[in-house]
């Protein structure tokens, strides 16, 4: 067994109350590395076609990567996955904090959960042992209370807890899985899968950890990052929301359901304002010196508990500018509600913003909204809807289905204003500002996602364009709002690399270059890996997810953008543009060719799957 792994995967059948261990061989580990790779393999190789995402047959997978928990800056991430209740396709979300490292310290590289318990339970995993325990008293409680109760009952304040929250219990389609109370595996509705199994929490604690093959090599990576303190000083000072004003200035801050790119209230909700008014502490993830996490508190119009951390950029924009809300305490309180109940702040905010636009246009009325005035900027309505969504009460019950299903249920032309791809709401980065990003949004197997994507705005600078030489590209700077053929080629490689990062458990914020990632993985595992091999891992994991989606009924025709992005994005210079339909279609066609995907099914071709060493995956498409 290579270094960096425990060599064991825990399988839990909640219906049968049965536990077993799987002992994969080294070939399996090297082929998939962990995270996204483990999840995609589990879903495609071991589940039947067409299962309901909320059925007992849908496996919920918590998977660390080879780097997860290693003594290297920003090596604290792991992945969670299942068939998504939001999209009906491949579901995967990544999260930092300390839980992933603790799972490996407890003796497991992954935990795979199937079945459905007859009553609420939690899973207690500690030093190679696992128990299914009663969780009746935890059901219906906020996440901070559940974590406190578990630590008290188990007698250890260092226990780490992952949990679905009340939103997951109520099967909200974009419920997330909270870790350490304030870190979310946020996207694709995995909390609803956990809630459907009546699994309220997984508590982990361990006193061992797999050794790295070359600790000195990890020290070199640490020294490299620490030597670049100035590059991430802004992240530490004001968090991920520190760039709100600069984004607003250039017209790329999603505002009023992506209708605009500038928000007149941006200064009230930016990171520096949070620092001045609400910040009480800074937090970080395992072994990360950046400390981009916020801890906020307020006793004003809204009571904000620091136990739930503080809003990051995506939340600030989703619950703030996208809803036209400039009330900072309300946004912080909305973030607290999402963390306390287990809601994805992105989908929550975009769904509420969609309802607000439909209300403004007269497509929804007070009769539909339980009397709520859903005008943009109504912070009280925003916070009430967050509560209603989590509890599936009143109009919130409909919004808990996500924008696609809610729009289809209402009709009246509301579908036009639903900002989603494959049913998942868009993150807070507008593709009309950087066209290459739109390639990734449209083609992502999870629906719209910014984390395993290509962001082309930085390529406007010569210095950043030159960095692409490490991936084999010798290109001149490219305007962000163009789609030369080179962008499709760059996107194909960058996205493979981003998926790789979700396989190994390394955060994308530190300025690691591809050769650093190779060196880190070699130092942890002892494998003599190459950059080409690692990119193949990312490409393989992406290919498996695309095959899975094709098996579940998705096709190339589903790789689209919503109508909103055909509209010009207003810009400060008055020269706003929408996504160019013809050029985008050509770019996606070229991207398909580069990835080896079939232009009709959207799945990788049998030849590509053979090249990636997974010819068996093609059998999933034969039927």
Image (spheres, rainbow, N blue to C red):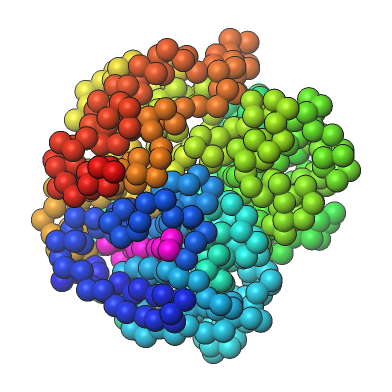
- Above or below, 268 relative to 147: above
The part of the image, by quadrant, that contains residue 371 is top right
Magenta: main secondary structure equals loop
The part of the image, by quadrant, that contains residue 349 is top right
Q: Residue at x 23, y 31 (%)?
A: 596
What's drawn in magenta, residue-wise?
Answer: 57-71
Q: Residue at x 27, y 47 (%)?
A: 620
- Above or below, 543 relative to 252: below
Residue 503 lies in magenta, yes or no? no
The part of the image, by quadrant, that contains residue 264 is top right
- Above or below, 68 relative to 246: below
- The one nearer the camera, 615 or 320, is 615
> How many circles with numbers are drawn on the protein?
0
Q: Position of residue 46 (x, y in %)?
A: 30, 60
- Above or below, 383 relative to 198: above
Q: Residue at x 63, y 10 (%)?
A: 574
Q: Position of residue 90 (x, y in %)?
A: 41, 48
- The one nearer the camera, 156 or 186, is 186
Q: Position of residue 607 (x, y in %)?
A: 15, 36
In this rendering, would 180 be left or right of 46? right
Q: Is residue 365 visible?
A: yes
| Quadrant for the N terminus in the image | bottom left
Residue 65 lies in magenta, yes or no? yes
Q: Residue furthest left?
A: 528
Q: Residue furthest top?
A: 575
- The one nearer the camera, 254 or 476, is 254
- The one nearer the camera, 607 or 620, is 620
| Quadrant for the C terminus in the image | top left
Q: Is residue 284 visible?
A: no
């Amino acid at each position: 067994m290579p270094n960096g792994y425990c060599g064991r995967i825990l399988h839990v059948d909640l219906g049968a109350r049965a536990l077993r261990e799987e002992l994969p061989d080294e070939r399996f580990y090297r082929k998939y590395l962990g995270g996204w790779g483990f999840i995609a393999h589990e879903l495609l190789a071991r589940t039947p076609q067409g299962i309901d995402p909320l059925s007992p047959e849908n496996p919920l997978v918590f998977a660390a990567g080879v780097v997860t928990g290693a003594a290297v800056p920003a090596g604290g991430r792991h992945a969670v996955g299942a068939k998504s209740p939001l999209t009906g396709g491949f579901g995967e979300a990544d999260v930092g904090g300390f839980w992933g490292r603790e799972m490996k310290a407890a003796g497991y590289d992954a935990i795979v959960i199937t079945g459905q318990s007859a009553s609420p339970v939690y899973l207690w995993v500690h030093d190679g042992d696992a128990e299914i325990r009663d969780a009746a008293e935890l059901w219906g409680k906020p996440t901070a209370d559940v974590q406190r109760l578990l630590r008290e009952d188990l007698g250890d304040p260092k226990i780490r807890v992952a949990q679905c929250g009340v939103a997951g219990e109520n099967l909200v389609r974009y419920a997330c899985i909270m870790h350490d109370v304030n870190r979310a595996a946020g996207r694709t509705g995995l909390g609803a899968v956990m809630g459907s199994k009546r699994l309220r929490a997984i508590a982990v604690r361990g006193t061992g950890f797999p050794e790295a093959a070359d600790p000195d090599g990890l020290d070199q990576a640490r020294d490299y990052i620490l030597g670049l303190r100035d590059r991430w000083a802004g992240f530490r000072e004001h968090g991920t929301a520190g760039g709100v004003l600069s984004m607003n200035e250039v017209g790329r801050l999603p505002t009023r359901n992506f209708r605009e790119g500038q928000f007149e209230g941006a200064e009230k909700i930016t990171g520096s304002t949070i620092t001045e008014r609400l910040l009480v502490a800074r937090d970080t993830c395992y072994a990360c010196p950046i400390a981009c996490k916020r801890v906020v508190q307020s006793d004003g119009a809204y009571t904000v508990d620091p136990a739930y951390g503080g809003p990051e950029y995506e939340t600030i924009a989703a619950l703030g500018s996208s809803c036209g809300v400039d009330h900072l305490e309300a946004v912080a309180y909305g973030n607290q509600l999402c963390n306390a109940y287990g809601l994805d702040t992105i989908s929550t905010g975009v769904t509420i913003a969609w309802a607000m636009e439909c209300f403004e246009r007269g497509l929804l009325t007070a009769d539909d909204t339980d009397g709520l005035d859903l005008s943009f900027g109504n912070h009280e309505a925003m916070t009430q809807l967050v509560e209603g969504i989590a509890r599936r009460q009143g109009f919130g019950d409909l919004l808990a289905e996500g924008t696609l299903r809610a729009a289809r249920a209402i009709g009246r032309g509301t579908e036009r204003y639903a900002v989603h791809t494959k049913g998942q709401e868009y993150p807070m980065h507008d593709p009309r500002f950087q066209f290459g990003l739109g390639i990734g949004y449209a083609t992502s197997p999870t629906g719209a996602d910014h984390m395993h994507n290509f962001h082309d705005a930085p390529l406007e600078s010569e210095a950043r364009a030159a960095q692409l030489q490490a991936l084999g590209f010798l290109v001149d700077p490219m305007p962000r709002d163009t789609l030369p053929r080179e962008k499709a080629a760059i996107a194909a490689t960058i996205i493979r690399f981003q998926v790789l990062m979700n396989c190994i458990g390394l955060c994308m914020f530190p300025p690691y270059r591809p050769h650093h990632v190779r060196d880190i993985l070699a130092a942890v595992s002892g494998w003599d890996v190459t950059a080409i091999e690692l990119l193949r891992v990312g490409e393989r994991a992406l290919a498996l997810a695309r095959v899975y989606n094709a098996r579940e009924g998705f096709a190339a025709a589903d790789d689209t953008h919503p109508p909103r992005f055909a509209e010009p994005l207003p810009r400060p210079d008055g020269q706003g543009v929408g996504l160019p339909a013809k050029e985008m279609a050509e770019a996606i066609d070229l991207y398909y060719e580069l990835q080896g995907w079939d232009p009709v099914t959207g799945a990788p071709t049998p030849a590509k799957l053979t090249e990636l060493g997974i010819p068996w995956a093609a059998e999933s498409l034969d039927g």
